[in-house]
Amino acid sequence: QVQLVESGGGSVQPGGSLRLSCATSGSILSVHTMGWYRQAPGKQREMVAHITSGGSINYIDSVKGRFTISRDNAKNTVALQMNSLKPEDTALYYCNAAITTYGTVITNYWGKGTLVTVSS
């Protein structure tokens, strides 16, 4: 059973920083693309950033220059450094990973989310 567990959420004032981390566990053969999504109240879930196993990165336009995604392929973890946070970044942030386990095809897994609140 594969699990993704996020940590690092919290409350911060506008302009502040937070670092989200996501750890994986289970019988993992390989981890492909990893990413972060978010869902604000009353809005659809949206992709924030993702990074392939080869290091290719994409960001949603609204976070470019402020957020940095990184991964540790040896530990199968992914992190999101968030700087210059804005109130509109307030959301539940989810970790996502495409993972191959022993004897299966690539499956998309989600964490349960970590809340980020940006408010003065």
Image (spheres, helix red, strand yellow):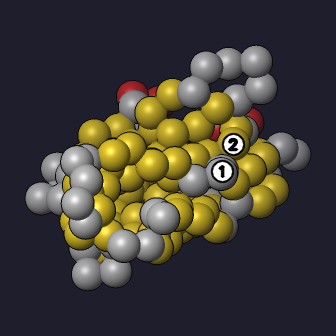
Residue occupying image coordinates x 34% and y 80%: 75
Q: Going by the picture, which residue comes out furthest to the left?
A: 54
In this rendering, would 117 be left or right of 37? Answer: right
Q: Going by the picture, which residue comes out furthest to the right?
A: 120
* Residue identifier under label 1: 113
Disc 1, disc 2: CB below 8 Å? yes
Residue occupying image coordinates x 69% and y 42%: 92
- Residue 35 % position (x, y): 39, 48
Q: Going by the picture, which residue comes out furthest to the front?
A: 103
For marks 1 and 2, give the one nearer the viewer: 1
Secondary structure of the residue carrying tag 1 is: loop
Which amino acid type is marked by label 2? Leu
Residue occupying image coordinates x 70% and y 29%: 40
- Residue 32 % position (x, y): 23, 55
- Residue 21 lies, with reference to residue 65, above or below; the image says below
* Residue identifier under label 2: 92
Query: In the image shown, does 35 or 84 lie closer to the viewer?
Result: 35
- Residue 36 % position (x, y): 47, 47
Secondary structure of the residue carrying tag 2 is: strand
Query: In the image shown, does 38 or 83 lie closer to the viewer?
Result: 38
Label 2 neighbour load within 10 Å: few <14, some 14-19, many 20+: some
Q: Which image quadrant is residue 26 in?
A: bottom left
Separation (CA) of disc 1 from disc 2: 6 Å
